[in-house]
Amino acid sequence: MRLASRLSALAALSLTFTCIAGCTTTGLFRSTLPSDMAPAQGEAIAPNGSFASGAPGSEQQGSGLKGGEVDDNADFAAYLTYLSSFSGGGVAPLDVSERFQFWLRDPASRSVPNATVTVLAGVDEVFSAKSASNGRVLFFPKAFPLAAQASDSFTVRVEKGAQQFTRTIPKDGARDVVLEWPEARADIAPKLDLCFTLDVTGSMGDELSRIQTTIGDIAARIKSLPDAPVLRYGLVAYRDRGDDFVTRHFDFTPDLDTFRARLNSLAAAGGGDYPEALNEGVGTSLNALSWDAAESVRLMFMVGDAPPHLDYPQDVPYTTHMVKAAERGIKIYPLGASGLDARGEYVFRQMAQFTGGKFLFLTYGGQTSHQVGTVQENNLDDLVVGIVKAELADLK
């Protein structure tokens, strides 16, 4: 059974993430962009000609936003306890209680990123994913009904370029498995696709301008890193069905000024009920942008303050999107803005944990309402830049 069939089987269980900002009235875009900054086909420009605070040429004072982070794969037992203690509705549970971590290493123990790892039960494909910059692939057998067809072992096929090999993995064996690449990997020139997916509904209005400033600062800092990667910035905004748009996207650009102009043209409006069209936002981020499928680090930072609608017809659930993200080697780093409830936290943490990312959240006075235990507060831009630096360091 191919991956499309497996995703169909998951559709009853699934949903996604992108940068979220609350909406209230009209117009996503506040500026008239020159032709080389124009949005993708189907996107709208509002008639107002002024940029929001933080646009190119304006004084950057910094947002002052603080935040924390949780890596639920690092403390996996605590994460499973969190999942089992959740008693609310409005989420799509996916059983991740059984986890394999495959680590691709060359003979010098260097990570092998962007290899395709396929898990088979007999002749049927159960799951496929690209290895991350640290060489890791996460596999959760109980999330895939086909995995139950495996008798006592899985076959794992590893492919990259012209190289391919297979391994037999006992179902009841070690959960951390090193897959040894047969030859030394070549040095990798760092390349980075960085997508920001934003909720731009009215409820995000109180924080959107500060988030825009922070994202602009983050983009500039990453561009100026020593041994800076070949860098492209993508942008997706989403609202809700019934608003003047559901999603808008700007494809990847290598130009920082173009990205900042696009970013700062966003305004909060629309929404209404609490859940938003997060599923569509994440789906647009995955499918409408021209992600580099080769030797790149692919990161999606999704910012929002609300969970997804799970009651819409003809919708693709976020769990399907996060499986697709793992298949393509795209890590999701959801950022919970103020107002994100327990349902939203559950969904955001699902997407981060399944794809190998982290759950990020805003803090105020060192406090958060999320069930994350003791965390260290830091400047939000420092957190995100630190994540990017760590991803790139794994390529060395």
Image (cartoon, rainbow, N blue to C red):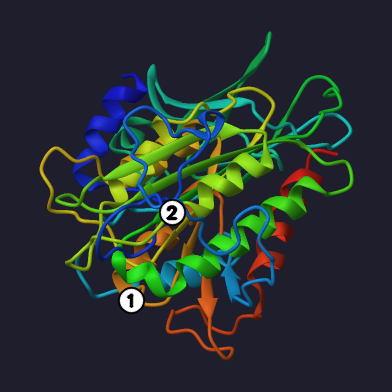
Q: The residue tagged with tag 1: helix, strand or loop?
A: helix
Residue 324: x and y in percent read: 41, 35
Q: Mark 2 points at which residue?
A: 266
- Vertical relation: 98 (above or below) 349: above
Nearest the camera: 198 or 76? 198
Q: Is residue 391 above or below residue 188?
A: below
> Is residue 64 depicted above or below 200 in this figure?
below
Which is nearer the eye, 352 or 304? 304
* Horizontal relation, residue 88 to residue 149: left or right: left
User: Are there few (<14), some (14-19), or many (20+) residues within 10 Å of tag 2?
Assistant: many
Q: Quadrant of the N terminus?
A: top left
Counting from the top left corner in percent of width and height, residue 37 is at 53, 34
**Residue 319 screen position, x and y as percent:** 33, 46
Number of labelled discs? 2
The answer to whether 31 appears left or right of 228 in the picture is: left
Residue on which the image places disc 1: 85
Q: Nearer the viewer, residue 72 or 29?
A: 29
The residue sitting at 19% across, 43% down in the picture is 12
Instruction: Look at the numbered disc 2 and give the secondary structure of its residue.
Output: loop
Residue sitting at x 85%, y 22%? 186
Q: Give the residue type at disc 1.
A: Ser
Question: Could you tell me how far apart the alpha carbons at marks 1 and 2 are, in whole angstroms?
Answer: 38 Å
Amino acid on which the number 2 mark rests in the picture: Leu
Picture coordinates of residue 113, whole percent (x, y): 69, 32
Q: Visible in this render: residue 332?
A: no
Instruction: Work out which quarter of the rendered image holds the C terminus and state it.
Output: top right
